[in-house]
Image (cartoon, helix red, strand yellow):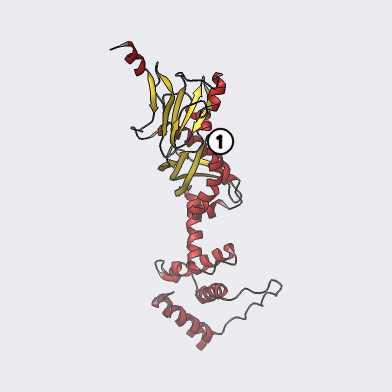
Amino acid sequence: MGLGSFIKKQFIDVLQWNEEVDGVLAWRYPMQDQEIQNGGVLVVRESQMAVFVNEGQIADVFGPGTHKLTTQTLPVLTNLKNWDKLFDSPFKSDVYYFSTRVQTGRKWGTPQPITIRDKDFDMVRVRAFGMYSYRVADPRLFFKEISGTREAYTRDEVEEQLRGILMATMASSLGSAQVPFLDMAANQALMAQQVKGDLATAFGRYGIGLDEFNVASVSLPEELQAALDERISAGMKGGMSADKMAGFTKYQAATAIPLAAQNEGGMAGIGVGLGAGVQLGQVMGQALGASLAPQAAPAAAAPAAPAEDSIEARLEKLKGLLDKGLITATDYDSTKAELLKKLLG
């Protein structure tokens, strides 16, 4: 092999990255003792960017396309190297490729519960899980803040850093939200929307663009989960839109009656006497009537308490409770006997 052939092999005519290994976000072109031929070709594929770095300082950045390397296409590097306009010899420079493809379906989660400030419960400890997608948006920032001069920087390595950023941002974002945490936990899309904007800003400081972010599940402490389940159940029963707390109270009153009737021994078995048995019908009627009736004007005076029903009226209400399945036949018969005894003396 002649000397000319040996020297020729040391010149790089074409620079390109085929991304043979999946999951690599930054890759340094292997220069070794080689030099880049002036007038050589730089190939940057779609979903890639290339950066020339001179002695640790970022020079020129190239997007997708085929670029002929001259002093005109490398203006910053030309200035750093003090080349004149007639430069025509090989040169050395570190070249880094960056994959700008969207990294989809990346999982996130809270290994330990995170503490969030909440205006209803003061402090809440929660766990959450979901998916997100991201990409390298600014190779300059990504090189300076994360990947550096390493030969290769992988997706797993960057996600180790993103995990800490994500946890801190979520705690801060949800803690400063004006929406009660239970409402956001019941609407995971709302929670994701609350976090996504702040998270995109945090990722952007490192040259990373957040593409998608969603919350798949939220794990609450048992007492908060119970409160959330009751609120959801109350909302599903309807009639709760005017006032959530008032609606929740109506829901509890409405569900208390069938629960009492299901107890062993019926109403009598839990110590409900004649008066309480008749009043159950009044409670049911008031609870259902209040949920269906239009809201009264705020300035309207409260209605006077109704007079005590006659025995005949009580018997009619008692029969209505039986027909609706809210009391057992045994309860009906025993209470009816008591009422008839009072009526007949």
Front in this rendered view, residue 102 or 170: 102
In this orientation, does residue 69 appear?
A: yes
Vertical placement of residue 38 versus 202, above or below: above
Residue 227 spot, x, y in % from top left:
51, 55
User: Farthest residue in the top direction?
Assistant: 3
Q: Farthest bottom residue? A: 344
> Which corner quadrant holds the N terminus?
top left
Q: Residue under circle 1?
A: 205
Q: Relative to residue 232, is residue 31 depicted above or below? A: above
Task: Residue 328: name its quadrant.
Answer: bottom left
| Residue in the picture at 49% in, 43% down | 210
Above or below, 37 relative to 252: above
- How packed mark 1 is, by other alpha carbons closer than 10 Å (few <14, some 14-19, many 20 or more), is few
Q: Position of residue 274 (x, y in %)?
A: 50, 76
**Considering depth in this image, is 211 or 72 the residue closer to the camera?**
72
Q: Residue placed farthest to the left in the image?
A: 1
Label 1: element kind: loop
Q: Looking at numbered disc 1 in the image, what kind of residue is underneath it?
A: Arg
Query: How many numbered callouts?
Result: 1
Where residue 343 appears, x then y in whole percent? 52, 87
Q: Nearer the viewer, residue 83 or 308?
A: 83
State the image coordinates of residue 336 (x, y, percent, origin top left). 46, 82
Residue 26 in view here: no
Q: What residue occupies the far right of the structure in this picture?
A: 299
